[in-house]
Amino acid sequence: MTPHLASLSRRMDELTDHKREFLEIGRRAGRFPSAIANYRPDGAGSEISIWCSNDYLGMGQNPRVMSAMKGAIDRFGAGSGGSRNIGGTNHYHVLLEQELAALHGKEAALIFSSGYTANDGALSVLATIGDCVVFSDELNHASIIDGLRHSGAEKHIFRHNDVAHLEELISAADPDRPKMVVLESVYSMSGDVAPIAEIAEVAKRHGATIFLDEVHAVGMYGPEGAGIAAREGIADDITIIMGTLGKGFGTAGGYIAGPATVIDTVRTLSRPFIFTTSLPPAIAAGALAAVRHLRGSELERTALHDNARLMHRLLAERGIPFISDNSHIVSVFVGDETACRTASTLLLERHGMYVQSINAPSVRAGEEILRVAPGAVHTAAEIEKFAAALDGIWQELDLPRCDLPGLHLPKARA
């Protein structure tokens, strides 16, 4: 064994109690949230229900989406054949970008292979232009952190959702330098929502560009599913909207939408965009079908928000703490890694309910959560059954309860 491999082995020994394990599942087409755990090609495995999926609206199982993907495969085959500028641009890529630009009321859009590469690829370019100084929320996603790090731009971190701290930091900057504020609308681990209107006012006073990550909002909030900024009526104050196709829209990929000059700059200079095989045409076709469907349908959004409100109420009645009731993400606060893993295991083994325990580095140590996502496809009866099961496990493990769930709890890191 080489010295390097020996070092790797020792490091893995140190991580034994914290290494990530993955449950192999087979989602059942047309029957989601039903799935088969430890799925095998012969269909063997145990039936479970999924309570932590990011396919919030069930669009990954939508008949229109699946039909569009099958049709695209019949016409164009499985893969795209190359990067976007070397033989890998299909008409569905163009149509999808046009649809996303229209959804957000922007001049243009650009799709990436994932939400992660969209943030990384866009920010690593945009933050380098004109000696820009960046102001970033402390709980921003790893992809934002990496994109800003790769840019090499000067960066200042403001306390989570703290508008006064942002004002303090941005006021201290050279008024003549280009500035950019980067934040998320819905934070993935805590489920809380940013005060976008107030932040937009600060940015406007200081002539700053806003880059808003709406990954956990597009499809689910606002008119036609355009996100939180659109819901608040301030989408025109946001320069660049970043979103994903892998959550509310049920497929895969990420995108940015904004002024044509911004999109052209990223398209020309972004390494993660230039040097990556483009999305398969079938994925683009499915995403296009999902976006078009959700622009014309409120049924899925209504069901999602009704189910989130029901889950919040049932947990509150039982004194089970959760971090925020601002969104559809119900982050049940445990605060102990072992207890969180145990609760997740008991839910799966006893009740067939799959909720992944979330520990460091996704959240700070001591702020472990069960990140519950009651989706549009769950029924009220299923949510009531889940809450009862969690209540029993809470009692068995003697986990702390609270009189005011969702209040005075530490915030989890996205």
Image (spheres, helix red, strand yellow):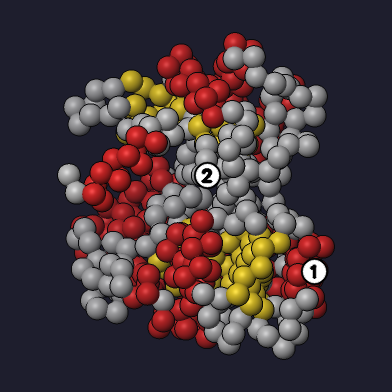
- Most extreme residue toward the front, as rendered? 3
Relative placement, left or right, of 274 versus 402 is left
State the SS at label 2. loop
Marks 2 and 1 sit apart, C-alpha to C-alpha, by 28 Å
Residue sitting at x 55%, y 23%: 339
Q: Position of residue 231 (x, y in %)?
A: 70, 58
Residue 94 - label: none
Q: Nearer the viewer, residue 303 or 411?
A: 411
Q: Secondary structure at mark 1?
A: helix
The part of the image, by quadrant, that contains residue 154 is bottom right
Task: Say whether residue 374 is left or right of residue 351.
Answer: right
> Label 2 amino acid?
Ser
* Label 2 close to label 1 by CB (< 8 Å): no
Quick check: 269 above or below 369? below
Name the residue tied to disc 2: 362
From this view, report whether residue 316 is shown above or below residue 218: above
Write the residue at 70% across / 54% down: 160
Residue bearing the label numbered 1: 167
Density class for disc 2 (Cα within 10 Å; few <14, some 14-19, many ≥20) is some
Residue 34 in view (yes/no): yes
- Point out residue 336 in the picture as x, y percentages from the top left corner: 59, 28
Give the quarter of the image for residue 63: top left
- Total label count? 2
Q: Nearer the viewer, residue 241 or 138?
A: 138
Residue type indicated by callout 1: Glu
Q: Quadrant of residue 348?
A: top left
Q: Is 247 placed above or below 25 here?
A: below
Q: Position of residue 408 (x, y in %)?
A: 78, 37
Q: Earlier in the sequence, mark 2 or mark 1?
A: 1
Quadrant, the N terminus: top left
Q: Position of residue 335 (x, y in %)?
A: 62, 30
| Mark 1: few/some/many CA within 10 Å (<14, 14-19, 20+) | some
